[in-house]
Image (cartoon, grey):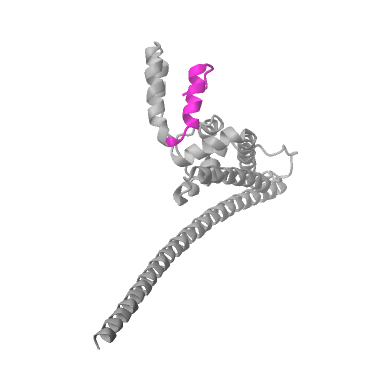
Amino acid sequence: MGRKRGGSDQEVDRLYASPPEEFIAARDELAKRLKAEGKSGAAAEVQGLRRPTVAAWAANQVARQRPADVAELLAAGAELHKAQRKALSGVKGGGFREAMERRRKAVVALVKAAEEVLREAGKGSASTVDALQPTFEAASVDEQAGDALKAGRLARERAAPSGFGGVTGLEVVAAPAEKPAPLVKKMKQDEAARAEQEAARREARELEKQAADARRKVMRVKASAARAQERADRLAAEADKARAMARDAARELREAEAEARRAEARAARSV
C-alpha cells in the first residue's frame, strides 16, 4: 500500500506497529470502518495487507525507533552497489572493501536493535533471530524491500541477496579515456585491464564466500548454544526430580523410624 497522506495512512502505520498476533483483528476492523465510511478502495487495500512475520515485525519496530540507522543501511547499500559496478568494470580504487565494511556495520547495528526488541517482547526464537541479518542485507540492495523497511511496513523476512545484491542488468562503469597508443602497447593495456577485472571478480567471489561462511558459522554457534541450553534445562529438571525423590525418601525414613519407635514402645509395655 502506498505512503499516502491522511488518517487512514496513519492507522495503517499503527497496524504494523502493533504486535503480530493483534494484526488480523485490527486490520479487519479498520477495513470494515473504512468501507462504512464509503472508502471502498482504501478498505480493499487494507483488507489485502498481510500480517508481518515476527522477524519482519521486529525490523519494522527498529525502523520506527532508529530511522537514522535505517537511512545509513540504505546509503551503505547504494555505495556497495556502485562499488560493485566499478569492481566488475576493472576500475581501480572503487572502494569495494570499504563499502562492504560500511554495509556490514550498518546491518550489525540493526540486528542488535531488533534482537533487543524481540527479547523485550519475549519472541526471540533462534529461527526468528537468524532471519534478521539476511532481511537487512536484502533491504540494503533491493529497492522494494528497502522502501518497505524505511516505512516500517515489511510483511516478511527476506533471503540474503546473491552476490551482494546481484549484478544482472548493471552497466559497467566506463574506464577513463586513454590516449591513442601503438597496437602492441594497446594490447598489453587491454590484457592488463582484463587481468585486473578478473582479479576484482575473484575478490568479489571470495568476499561473498567469506560472508556466507560467517553466516553459516553464526548459525552453527547459535544451534550449538540452543542445544547446550536444552541440555542444561534437561539436567536442571532431572536435578529437581532427584531432589524431590530425596525429600520423599527422607520423609519415608523418618516415618519408618517413628513407626519403629512406636512398635518398640508397644513391645516394652506388653512385657
Say left or right for 162 vs 196. Answer: left
Near-viewer residue (97 or 181)? 97
Q: x, y (%) of residue 126? A: 46, 51
Near-viewer residue (203 or 25)? 25
Task: Indicate the quadrant containing the C terminus: top left, top right, bottom left or bottom right.
Answer: bottom left
User: Is the residue 57 above or below the residue 270 in the image?
Assistant: above
Residue at x 41% of width, y 69% of height = 243
Q: Is residue 214 magenta?
A: no
Name of the residue lying farthest toward the bottom = 271
* Majority SS type along the magenta span: helix
Say left or right for 183 vs 39. Answer: right
Q: Which residues are magenta?
A: 1-20
Residue at x 74% of width, y 42% of height = 181
Instruction: Tell me where residue 88 sits by quadrant.
Output: top right
Say left or right for 102 vs 141. Answer: right
Question: Does residue 165 appear in the picture of this structure?
Answer: no
User: Is the residue 192 above or below the residue 267 in the image?
Assistant: above
Residue at x 45% of width, y 37% of height = 156
